[in-house]
Amino acid sequence: MKIKSITLITLASLVAVFNLYAEKGEKAMDKHHARFEALDTNKDGKVSKEEWNAHFNEMDTNKDGSIDENEMKKHHESMKEKMHEHHEKMEKKK
């Protein structure tokens, strides 16, 4: 009886851990998908050089042709905010 109980508890724990990792994996995939969609401005399923350059130009806030650490940090903060908004919309749809 003890072995069956221990086995059931172990299996239940493994299922819970698996579900946790699966959920995190889905969130990571959603995040990557949202990033791709943000870059794919014409929604053709591909990111063209022009779309990529537009993204670069958006990050290059002082328009010197390069991106410094501060510009990158500000961009990432902005993207985190946009991703958070995207995830909130997705949750409301469920």
Image (spheres, grey):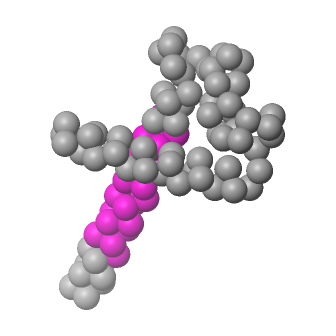
Q: Position of residue 18 (x, y in %)?
A: 39, 60
Identity of the residue furthest to the right in this view = 65
Q: Is residue 2 left or right of residue 22?
A: left
> Height in image: 70 above or below 39?
below
The answer to whether residue 17 shows anywhere in this view is yes
Give the residue furthest to the bottom: 2
Q: Quadrant of the N terminus?
A: bottom left
Provide the residue span drawn in magenta: 10-33
Closest to the observer, 49 or 32? 49
Please tell me which residue is depicted at 59% across the width and 47% down the height of the picture. Answer: 75
Q: 63 or 89: which is nearer to us?
A: 63
Residue 90 vs 18, above or below: the answer is above
Left or right: 7 as drawn, with respect to 73: left
63 displayed left or right of 4 = right
The structure residue drawn at horizontal position 68% and vertical position 31%, both measured from the top left corner, is 57
- How far from the left and from the top, in percent, is residue 58? 62, 34
Task: Say which residue appears at 34% left-offset and 58% top-offset.
Answer: 19
Where is residue 55? Give x, y as percent: 63, 30
- The chief SS type of the magenta part is helix
Residue 8 lies in the magenta stretch: no
Q: Is residue 11 magenta?
A: yes
Which residue shows up at 52% across the image and 36% down it? 35
